[in-house]
Amino acid sequence: MKLIVGLGNPESKYNWTRHNFGFLALDFYFKLNHLDWDKKPRYGAITGVSGDFLFVKPQDYYNESGRAVRELAHYYKIPPEDILVICDDFNLDFGKIRYRTSGSAGGNNGLKSLITELKTEEFPRIRLGTENAELRKKLGDVEFVLSRFTPDEKTALPEILAEVARRIDDFA
């Protein structure tokens, strides 16, 4: 079994924000594949299963995402190399998708939490670029990651999310 983790914040007020790009990617995947999320959260996360994939949306806030992932990985005996994490990255140009098999948190607090809880940097991740230099400069980093996508960015989301869905399917 493989764990596919989308990072985000649990409250609806964070829907369609840059920091919820991981949740958005998993919701898109579920809609595309006619899947349903389980009704009851498990180990502090919303989960869903498709084939050998356990999909996870941690319900702790973004910066504490690692706890639920650690508990699920322990329960299902899933090694770090079989945990794919999908998160936003404001240092990547909007629309850019970067896959790495391991690496540092690079300033991403959700990844920091995962690294701390899993006690390793050796897990794959897909970083989704959200950079918008003008908006980021105007808002500052914290407000920027919690800001909603612009209309032009929203128009590009289906193509980006379709590519992420392909990469999830390729994670075998």
Image (cartoon, grey):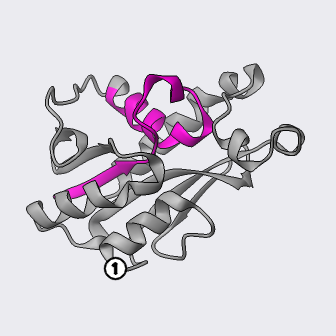
Compared to 5, does 74 lie above or below? below
Residue 34 image position (x, y, % from top left): 27, 22
The front one of 172 and 22 is: 22
How many numbered marks have been drawn onto this rendered protein structure? 1
Query: Is residue 12 rendered magenta in the image?
Result: yes
- The residue beneath circle 1 is 119
Q: Residue at x 11, y 68 (%)?
A: 77
Q: Position of residue 156 (x, y in %)?
A: 67, 28
Asked which quadrant contains residue 2, the reply is bottom left
| Residue name at image x 51 percent, y 51 percent | 87
- Work out whether residue 32 or residue 152 is closer to the camera in this orientation and state it: 152
Query: In the rendered structure, does residue 130 fall within the stretch colored magenta?
Result: no
The percent position of residue 170, horizontal first and vertical second, equals 37, 54
Quarter of the view holding residue 49? top left
Q: Is residue 95 visible?
A: no
Residue 91 x, y percent position in the rendering: 73, 57
Which residue is at the front of the view, 170 or 119? 119
Which image quarter is the N terminus in? bottom left
For the magenta stretch, what is the residue range? 1-30
Disc 1 marks a residue whose amino acid type is Lys
Residue at the image position 17 percent from the left and 49 percent from the top: 43
